[in-house]
Image (cartoon, rainbow, N blue to C red):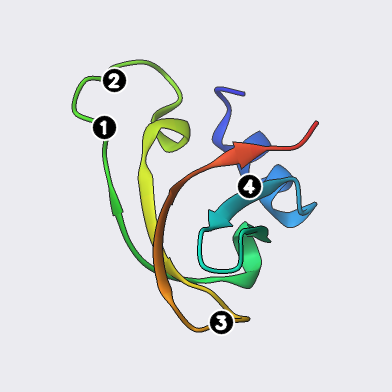
């Protein structure tokens, strides 16, 4: 999925998620409050968003978490 448009469509379809370790459950990308992201400095390919670490606030427990992105096919 090197096309940014495909990534955005997957987010809108609810197929991209982050993992909340406090709830021990997946959270949809569009349902969380995004606070920050950290690029993976060792990745130089065409899909940088899959290799970022996202910092987000869980809408259910309110905790601040860090997670990499996951795609549900």
Closer mark to the observer between disc 4 and disc 1: 1
Query: Residue sitting at 44 percent across and 50 percent down?
Result: 67
Query: Which secondary structure lies at badge 1?
Result: loop
Closer mark to the observer between disc 4 and disc 2: 2
Of pointers 3 and 2, the one earlier in the residue sequence: 2
Residue 49 found in image quarter: top left
**Which residue position is annotated with label 4?**
8
Residue 61 locus on image (x, y percent): 56, 82
**CB atoms of marks 2 and 1 within 8 Å:** yes
**Which residue position is annotated with label 1?**
40
Closer mark to the observer between disc 1 and disc 3: 3
Of pointers 1 and 3, the one earlier in the residue sequence: 1
Q: Nearer the viewer, residue 69 or 9?
A: 69
Of pointers 3 and 4, the one earlier in the residue sequence: 4
Cα distance in 3D space between marks 2 and 1: 6 Å
Q: Nearer the viewer, residue 70 or 12?
A: 70
Q: Dot 3, how many residues are within 10 Å of its Cα: few (below 14), some (14-19), or many (20+)? A: few
């Amino acid at each position: 999925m090197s096309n940014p448009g495909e990534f955005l469509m997957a987010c809108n379809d609810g197929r991209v998620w982050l993992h909340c370790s406090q709830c021990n459950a997946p959270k949809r990308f569009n349902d969380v409050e995004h606070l920050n992201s950290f690029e993976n400095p060792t990745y130089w390919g065409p899909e940088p968003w899959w290799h970022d670490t996202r910092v987000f606030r869980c809408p259910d427990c309110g905790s601040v978490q860090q997670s990499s992105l996951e795609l549900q096919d």
